[in-house]
Image: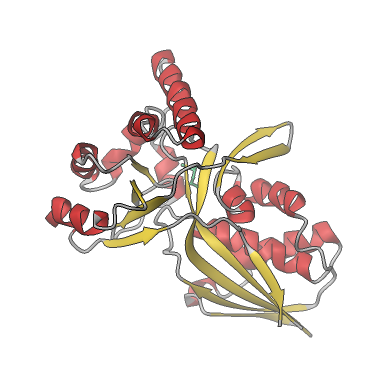
Amino acid sequence: MKVRVKVPATSANLGPGFDVAGLAVTLYNTFVFELIDEGIEITGCPKQFCNEENMTYQAFVEGAKQCGLKFNGLRIECKGEVPYTRGLGSSSTCIVAGIVGAYAFKDKYNDRQEILELATQIEGHPDNVAPAIFGGLTVSVMAEDHVTTLNIPVKHDYRFVAFIPPFSLSTAKSRSVLPQAIPRADAITNVSHLALMVASLINGYDEGLKLGFKDRLHQPYRGGLIEGYHEIMKVLEKDDCVLGAYLSGAGPTIMAVIKAEDTKGVVRLKDELGDLIKDWKVEKLELDMRGYTCDYE
Ligand code: HSE
C-alpha cells in the first residue's frame, strides 16, 4: 500500500500577523510514502536531502512515534511545485506531509488537530502549518503547548500575486535580523492593523486592506535583506487596484492581493514593476480551501 499526501504552499504573516496569520494557496507539493523492509529511499529532491536528515522523513518518524506506527524502512517519492526557501511554506509542506503520511498508515490521517500540534512543535510556529492543514486563511494562537486555529471566512474573492525572486532567503537568517523588543507605538500599530485586516476580510471591506496589511514588526527589518524590496513595495502601494502587499512568510517572495475580477492585474503589475522584477517568477494564485489531501494507492 502507498499513501499519497498533497500539501498546499502557504503564505504566512500577511503583514502584521507575524507568526499568527497565514493562508494556503493553489501550489502543491506531493509525497508518496511506502513502508519497505529496511532503509530509507528518497527520490524527487536534491541528492543532499535524500538521507535521514530529510525533513519529511524526520516528520514521518515523529508522526510514527506519536500515533504508534512501527516501521522498518520507508520509501518517499517527492514531487514539488513549491519553490524552496522563498517564503511559500515549502518546509511546512514537508513537515505536514511526513506526519500525515505516518498517521495514514494507522488510518488516522484526518486527525487534523493532533497533526497541527505536532507540526507546530516541529516548525516552532503555527502560521504556515495551520493553513497547510486546514486550508483557507487562518489565525493561530499558541498557549501552554496548545494551538488554537480558526479559519477566517473571507467574504470577497481575491487573487494572490506572488513575486518570487531568483535568490533564496533562509528563515533563520530572516529571523536573525529581528529585534528582541519593539517600540510600544509599533506594537499598537500592528495590533490595530491585524484587527483591521481580519475585520475587513470578514466584512468584505476592501478599503481597509491596504492599511491592514501594513506591518511594523518584521518587514522593516527584513526589507534590507531583499534586493528591490522597498522599490517594489512602493510601486505596489501606488497601484489603486492592489488591495494590499506584504512579505510572504520570512521572504523573499512579495505578495500582492488583488480582486478576482482584476483580470489584467498581473500584466499591469509586471509592466509597472519592469526591471525591478527581472528574472523573478510571477504566479497568480487562489486560496486553497481544503488544506492537505491524503489518499491510498
Ligand atoms: N512567521 C515565520 C517568519 C514564517 O516570518 O519567520 C516563516 O517560517
Residue at screen point 38% across, 29% down: 208
| Depth order, front residue of 156/132 | 156
- Which quadrant would residue 97 be assigned to in this image? bottom right
Where does residue 123 sit, x and y in percent of width and height? Answer: 60, 49
Q: Is residue 289 left or right of residue 190?
A: right
Q: Confirm whether residue 168 shows in the render.
A: yes
| Depth order, front residue of 49/117 | 117
Residue 51 sits above or below residue 60 on the image: below
Q: Quadrant of the C terminus?
A: bottom right
Where does residue 51 sit, x and y in percent of width and height? Answer: 60, 73
Q: Confirm whether residue 180 shows in the render.
A: no
Residue 27 sits above or below residue 177 on the image: below
Residue at screen point 32% across, 32% down: 220
- Which quadrant would residue 36 be assigned to in this image? bottom right
| Depth order, front residue of 35/262 | 262
Q: Quadrant of the N terminus?
A: bottom right
Where does residue 170 sit, x and y in percent of width and height? Answer: 42, 52
Residue 220 sits above or below residue 114 on the image: above
Residue at screen point 35% across, 57% down: 168
Q: Is residue 212 left or right of residue 232?
A: right
Where does residue 145 sit, x and y in percent of width and height? Answer: 73, 36
Residue at screen point 76% across, 63% down: 109
